[in-house]
Image: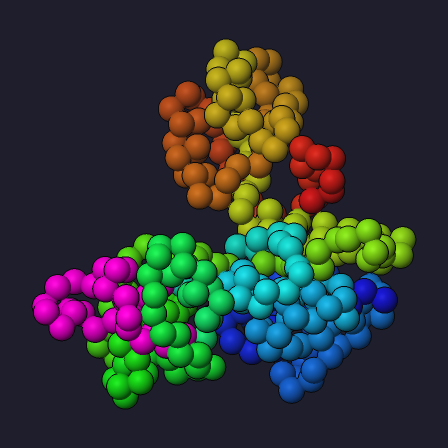
Amino acid sequence: MLRVALPNKGTLAEPAATMMREAGYRQRSDSRDLSMLDEENGIEFFYLRPKDIATYVGSGDLHLGITGADLMDESGSQVKRVIELGFGASKFRFAAPERTEDGRDWKLEDLEGKKIATSYPRLVRAHLARNRVRADIIKLDGAVEISVQLGLADAIADVVSSGRTLRQHGLKPFGAAIAASQATLIEREPRPDREETVEVKSAKQVFTARVQGVVYARQYLMLDYDCPEDVLEEAKRITPGMQAPTVSPLMQKGWFAVRSMVSRSCANKVMDDLAALGVRAILTSEIRSCRAVDGTGIGI
């Protein structure tokens, strides 16, 4: 039985559950449930605090988990990234009142000797050490933004998405991002003394392939169009697809039906370029899931 950890709350919880449903897995109907057995697919889901997921996976108690990349790094657990899932994007940054005591914009070196409140002391210490800045780190489990207003800290280091919460407390991010994060599928670091059974390996491959299929489906659209023969090669160059486009002759001589996957982010530009060539009946459609093979031959 494959054991997988999912976030039980927070910004990653519902998107992770939605992705599991799109991959064909049952999910809990009551948010208070801490586990859910999907017997048909041979998998049991455990709903845990996002901060704890890397610890459980790193210890080997669970085979796979979904958590933020920043939380994975902060945990120090022996885990590795399997797939970046494309949601929950954020940046981890320093923030402080808009001006220093002498009226300047904050710079990283201004943190020398200051008190910094954060829920991610490991990441902050490593970043400061790389930049040769010494500061006092104050570990908090939440509500980091209020620490400056209460006089506990001079600055904070926290996850920033929209920045709305920082502005509410009179804080402004500064300096380069300490780290960038998004939801990530993780597994335990492989070692010779941690050999998995054939059944677990096989179950992990199936699960990973399903999840990667959903990620790809969200990134790509299926594009169909009718193309005259004299511009077919140029059209194929514009729409190379994952491996190569599918090309079939139409009943009308000199015309071909072409089907190819295109990146969702540039689909409209591709359609414009095809139309300029004289291509007709250009249509896009959603992809619910897919399977592909990467350069290593591993199913994704």
Q: Is residue 219 above or below residue 48?
A: above
Question: With respect to residue 245, does 291 lie above or below?
Answer: below
State whether residue 62 appears in this view: no
Question: Which segment is the magenta one?
Answer: 93-118
| Percent coordinates x, y for residue 68 in the rendering | 54, 64
Q: Nearer the viewer, residue 179 or 236?
A: 179
Is residue 160 rendered magenta in the image? no
Q: Is residue 262 left or right of residue 173?
A: right
Q: How is the image coloured?
A: rainbow
Picture quadrant where residue 150 is located? bottom left
Residue drawn at x 57%, y 40% as measured from the top left: 222
Q: Residue at x 85, y 66 (%)?
A: 1
On the image, the x and y values in percent for residue 120 come to 46, 71
Residue at 70% of width from left, 71% of height from top? 56
Name the quadrant containing residue 269.
top left
Q: Say which of 178 and 203 sits in front.
A: 178
Q: Is residue 152 visible in this depiction of the protein? A: yes
Q: Nearer the viewer, residue 277 or 159?
A: 159
Q: Percent position (x, y) of residue 47?
A: 67, 77
Q: Residue at x 67, y 61 (%)?
A: 78
Q: Is residue 16 left or right of residue 206?
A: left
56 or 112, which is in the foreground? Answer: 112
Q: Position of residue 242 (x, y in %)?
A: 61, 33
Residue found at the far right of this picture: 198
Task: Classify residue 182 as left or right of residue 103.
Answer: right
Q: How many marks?
A: 0
Of the 4 image quadrants, the one containing the C terminus is: top right
Q: Is residue 100 magenta?
A: yes
Is 231 placed above or below 42 here?
Answer: above
